[in-house]
Image (tube, rainbow, N blue to C red):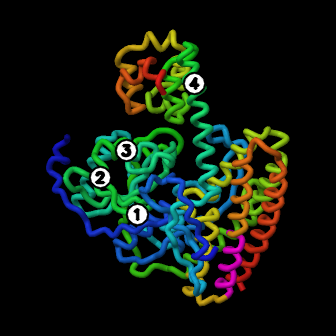
Amino acid sequence: MKTKDVPQDNANLMEGKFQEPVYSLDEDGNYTTVRSVGWDPKNTVMLHAWEEVNERIEEVRQKVLDGQLSPLAYHMEKNIMDTSLVGKYMGFWAFKVKRHLKPKRFNKLSRKTLEKYADVFNISVDEFTNIELLKEK
Amino acid sequence: MSIEEGKMKEQVMDFEHKQSAHCENGVVSNMLQYHGISLSEPMVFGIGSGMFFSHMPFLKVGRIPVTSFRPLPGIIFKRTSKRLGLTFEKKKFSDPRKAMEALDQNLSQGIPTGMLVGVYHLSYFPAPYRFHFNAHNIVAFGKKNDQYQISDPIMDHVEQLTYDQLRKVRYAKGVFAPNGHMYWLREKPKEIPLEKAILKGIRQTCKHMLEIPVPLFGANGIKYLSRKIRKYPDKLGPKKAAAYMGQIVRALEEIGTGGAGFRYMYGAFLQEAADVLNNPKLEGLSLDITGIGDQWREFAIITGRIVKNRNKATESYGAAADLLLEISKEEKAFFKKLKMAIDS
């Protein structure tokens, strides 16, 4: 790729925080880096990946509101985690986390366990457990 | 706060932060610069045999098979330091407090210190790029107003992290959990064996791209992927097929590749290597791999269209598969030529 052809298609994926160096050939045929704000094909696949994530979050949110799953399921999905990864942060086996996805089990959890979960997701215990808050999302 | 932290005098080293494409090369390049060794990012990348290809359908991340254009994290670093005769001190800690104390101690002695961290909780990263990837490399080179001064090769500028923020990313969990891993340069030779290191790096890349007897890796891996994606629309349906295709391009253009799955960066490496080794053949090969990189970008464009029109007809999958087959052939021919160019 020539330096003058390095794409600058901005989809604000980098939120203005940095630009990506792209290697390309300048007019004298020497390799150099050009900072790029983005490229359409990459933007498309990145946005698509996040769309898929958001779709799943929405599905789980509905299930939590319907009482099929506990709020843990929502926050797990929201943080793109699975039971095994949450388990590692909690010091639990994955199956134990899986049990807590059931509202019945979840409602029996101790304050201490809830605090630990909330800390993993970087939120307060109220934000973690309050289903009302999920209605407006 | 422990006693050591309280006592630590705040100071910042004269560490030059330079942005690079890839974190592993970038950290090595920046750390060596501090110790008086000037090596560009492509040089570090080429010596560490950073270019690769693998497609592992059985290994899934987020329900999608993994395609990768680089070796496992940490390998480039390991190879580069070995080939240049550099000795790094490395440490891991089970206790996060001890890990932070050890860092403070290093900083108060004026030692820029590399660390492995998880990206997900890295506060200065843009949100769309934050996922659970744990093998990111950064360097701390001082403390000012209780903020660690961080050189993150991905970022334009020097960043800051608080004690708690840094502790959290050093103890991210999951695959490649860093466990507080930190490293710093202990010894360097009087003169680095640059030419020998370059040749070793090239030889290993050729070997890995041509000779691994499992068809998931190297040029054969690309052919394998071509066969797979031809069947994607029928086998997976339009939604899943598009998701699978998207991952390939995300890996190809992942932050740090410098474009086209490191193929351009390898071109830059060969151009520099041609000078160092006084081998004009490498100059021509640099152009060849640049052309192959352009084809990979073409593949990304087709895939972008597939993903965008994922609910419509599925004809482009054939075109994408054809192109990959062509790339596989060209990469095979390229690495054969490269091997000849340095061994004759």
Q: Is residue B80 visible?
A: yes
Q: Give the percent coordinates (x, y) of residue B135.
A: 49, 51
Is residue B33 shown in magenta?
A: no
Task: Name the residue carrying label 2.
Answer: B103
| Screen quadrant of the C terminus of chain B | bottom right
Task: Name the residue carrying label 3.
Answer: B93
Between label 1 and label 3, give the one nearer the viewer.
Answer: 1
Q: Give the percent coordinates (x, y) of residue B151.
A: 36, 60
Task: Name the residue carrying label 4.
Answer: A60
Q: Give the percent coordinates (x, y) of residue B283.
A: 64, 84
Q: Nearer the viewer, residue B305 or B211?
A: B305
Identity, as a three-letter code, of the amino acid under mark 2: Leu
Between label 2 and label 1, give the one nearer the viewer.
Answer: 1
* Residue B265: quadrant of the picture: bottom right
Identity, as a three-letter code, of the amino acid under mark 1: Asp
Identity, as a three-letter code, of the amino acid under mark 4: Val
Pointers 4 and 3 in contact (CB under 8 A)? no
SS label for mark 3:
loop
Return the chain for callout 3: B
Q: Residue at x 53, y 24 (%)?
A: A73
* Residue A54: quadrant of the picture: top right
Left or right of B258? Residue B39 is left
Mark linked to residue B156: 1
How far separated are the C-alphas under marks 4 and 3? 37 Å
- First reached walking from the N terminus: tag 2 or tag 3: 3
How far separated are the C-alphas under marks 1 and 4? 37 Å
User: Is residue B41 shown above or below B184?
Assistant: below
- Which stretch appears magenta? B281-293
How far separated are the C-alphas under marks 2 and 3? 11 Å
- First reached walking from the N terminus: tag 1 or tag 3: 3
How far separated are the C-alphas under marks 2 and 1? 24 Å
How far separated are the C-alphas under marks 4 and 2? 41 Å
